[in-house]
Image: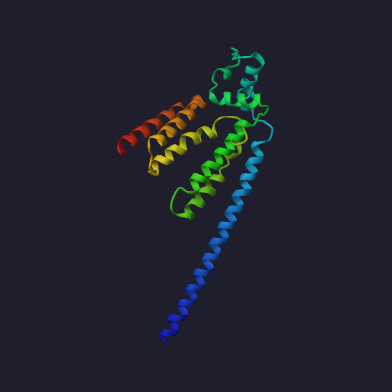
C-alpha cells in the first residue's frame, strides 16, 4: 500500500513538473513575441514625422537655423536657442543627410541596448523577463522614443555604465575609458544631465578606487 501511495505521488509530482515546464516555455514564447511586437511599434514611432513642440521648437529648429545662416545664430527672444547641447548638433547631422529622425532612431537603438541589459541583469531568467516587461510597459516611453530630444539615449549613456559598475563586471583600463566617455557623452547632450552625470562620475571614480 505504501508503494502504491509513493508511486501515485511520484506520478502526480512528475505530471505537475511537466505541465509547469510547458507553461514556462509557452510563457517565454509569449513574452518573446510580445517584446518583438512592442519593439516593432516603437520602431514605427521612431520613424514617423516629428510633431512634438520641443523638437519643432529648438531640437530641430536650432540645427535648421544653423543650416540657413551658415553658423550659430542666437535670437534674444528665442530663449531655447541658448540652451542647446551636443544633441542638437547630432540632429544637425541628420538634417544635413536629409532626415529629421536621427534623434528618435538613436532613442530606439538605446531602448534595444537597455532591454539587453535588463534581460541579463540577474541570474534568474524569470526576474529578468519581468524587468523587461515592466520596462517596456512604461507609458513614458511613448513620449521619449519618437521625439528628437536627446533625453532617452542620454539617460542610457549614463545608466548603462552605472549598471556595469554595480554588477561588478571585470573592468580594465579600456573598459573604464569607455565607461567614463559614455557618461561624459551623456552630460554633453543636455545641460539638465550635468547634476546626474557628475554624480555618476564621482560614483564611478569612488567605486573603481575601492576595487583598485
Please state the horizontal and vertical placement of residue 36, each as a whole percent of the image: 61, 49
Tell me what residue is drawn at x 50 percent, y 36 percent.
156
Picture quadrant where residue 93 is located: top right
Tell me what residue is drawn at x 69 percent, y 32 percent.
49
Please state the horizontal and vertical placement of residue 175, each as a whole percent of the image: 42, 36
Query: Which residue reaches farthest top?
Result: 76
Check the image and report above or below for 188 versus 126. above
Check the image and report above or below for 208 versus 71. below
Q: 172 or 107, which lies in front?
A: 172
Q: 177 or 104, which lies in front?
A: 177
Check the image and report above or below for 88 versus 108. above
Query: Which residue reaches farthest bottom?
Result: 1
Quadrant housing the N terminus: bottom left
Quick check: 32 left or right of 9?
right
Check the image and report above or below for 66 versus 28. above
Please state the horizontal and vertical placement of residue 67, each as a whole percent of the image: 65, 18
Picture quadrant where residue 203 is located: top left
Tell me the colour scheme of the image: rainbow
Quick check: 53 left or right of 121?
right
**How many numbered marks appear?**
0
Tell me what residue is drawn at x 51 percent, y 32 percent.
154
Quadrant housing the C terminus: top left
Please state the horizontal and vertical placement of residue 126, each as a whole percent of the image: 49, 55
Amino acid at each position: 500500500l505504501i508503494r502504491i501511495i509513493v508511486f501515485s505521488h511520484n506520478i502526480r509530482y512528475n505530471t505537475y513538473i511537466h505541465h509547469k515546464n510547458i507553461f514556462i516555455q509557452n510563457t517565454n514564447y509569449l513574452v518573446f513575441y510580445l517584446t518583438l511586437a512592442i519593439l516593432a511599434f516603437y520602431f514605427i514611432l521612431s520613424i514617423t514625422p516629428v510633431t512634438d513642440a520641443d523638437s519643432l521648437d529648438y531640437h530641430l529648429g536650432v540645427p535648421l537655423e544653423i543650416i540657413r545662416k551658415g553658423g550659430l545664430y542666437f535670437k534674444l527672444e528665442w530663449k531655447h536657442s541658448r540652451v542647446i547641447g551636443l544633441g542638437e548638433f547630432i540632429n544637425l547631422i541628420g538634417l544635413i543627410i536629409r532626415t529629421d529622425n536621427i534623434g528618435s532612431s538613436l532613442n530606439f537603438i538605446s531602448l534595444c541596448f537597455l532591454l539587453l541589459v535588463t534581460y541579463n541583469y540577474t541570474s534568474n531568467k524569470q526576474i529578468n523577463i519581468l524587468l523587461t516587461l515592466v520596462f517596456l510597459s512604461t507609458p513614458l516611453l511613448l513620449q521619449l522614443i519618437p521625439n528628437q530630444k536627446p533625453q532617452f539615449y542620454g539617460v542610457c549613456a549614463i545608466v548603462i555604465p552605472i549598471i556595469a559598475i554595480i554588477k561588478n563586471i571585470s573592468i580594465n583600463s579600456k573598459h573604464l575609458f569607455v565607461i567614463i566617455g559614455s557618461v561624459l557623452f551623456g552630460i554633453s547632450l543636455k545641460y539638465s544631465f550635468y547634476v546626474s552625470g557628475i554624480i555618476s562620475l564621482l560614483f564611478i571614480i569612488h567605486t573603481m578606487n575601492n576595487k583598485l
